[in-house]
Image (spheres, rainbow, N blue to C red):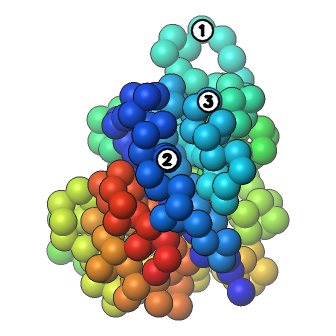
Amino acid sequence: MRKRIVAGNWKMNKTPSEAALLIGELIPLVNNDNVDVVFCVPAIDIPCAVELTKDTNIRIGAQNMYFEDKGAFTGEIAPDMLKDAGAEYVIIGHSERRQYFAETDETVNKKVLKAFEYGLKPIICCGETLTQREQGITIEWVCMQIKIALLGLTPEQIADVIIAYEPIWAIGTGKVATKEQAQEVCAAIRGCVREIAGDAAADAMRIQYGGSVTGDSAPDLFAMEDIDGGLVGGASLKPDFGRIVNA
Ligand code: PEP
């Protein structure tokens, strides 16, 4: 049985003092030990988020990191900085990073390898554009993204990865994929992992759906066989996140 995992991607929202208020509001709403609950907060909020959640079931994650250890990379954040601040997870390759900050499958792979070096759990994002879906190449595209992201990892590491399948047309648009559309791609991702890393890794690896999930859509999506939780943007900043966690 795979433990469910629901992660909130706060994106570029909430100053440290605003984050403290929101965390205080959400703690009682997401108190469910059957689910791994992760808040992926802006880097500047990590220390206060770690402090405020230390006696709770919530774990803290970052939204990005660089793939080098340290050095002359102005503005970047190193994996040991995240680790030392108390982050346990890191989102890698979110479509907004790919679209606005020129991330590629290759940089995603470098970051995933580096996250493992420092004991951070990567949440690797993949997903197709509307054009790719309309052209019928969704599964091919997503499996290619995943194969490149996982290059050089051992099957044991792959078992510990979290993949977030996030159709780009569903992110922040209010258009949720149907449970059948989401299940089809998540099953294909698991199949592709089975080919490259074997049954044990494929059966253990957790796959999230992301894209306009709300408390109303979460129960149907999370009931699907290959969907082990969600990566949630907009709704992670609202009390609705509690309904999603408990779905
Ligand atoms: C996301 O940012 O990963 C996301 C899924 O956003 P939203 O839930 O707002 O679509």
Left or right of 41, for residue 192: right
Q: Earlier in the sequence, mark 1 or mark 3?
A: 3
Identify the residue position indicated by label 2 in the image: 24
Q: Hey, what amino acid is under mark 2?
A: Gly
Residue at the image point whose x is 63% and y is 66% from the top: 36
Closest to the observer, 191 or 25? 25
* Left or right: 200 in relation to 140: right
Q: Give the mark nearest the N terminus, 2 or 3.
A: 2
x and y, in percent, of residue 198 in the image: 75, 79
The reply to whether residue 211 is visible in this rendering is no
The residue indicated by pointer 1 is: 72
Q: Amino acid at mark 3?
A: Pro
Location of mark 3 (residue): 47
Q: CA distance from mark 1 to mark 2?
A: 37 Å
In this rendering, the answer to whether 4 lies above or below 68 is: below
Of circles 2 and 3, which is in front? 2
Residue 169 seen in render? yes
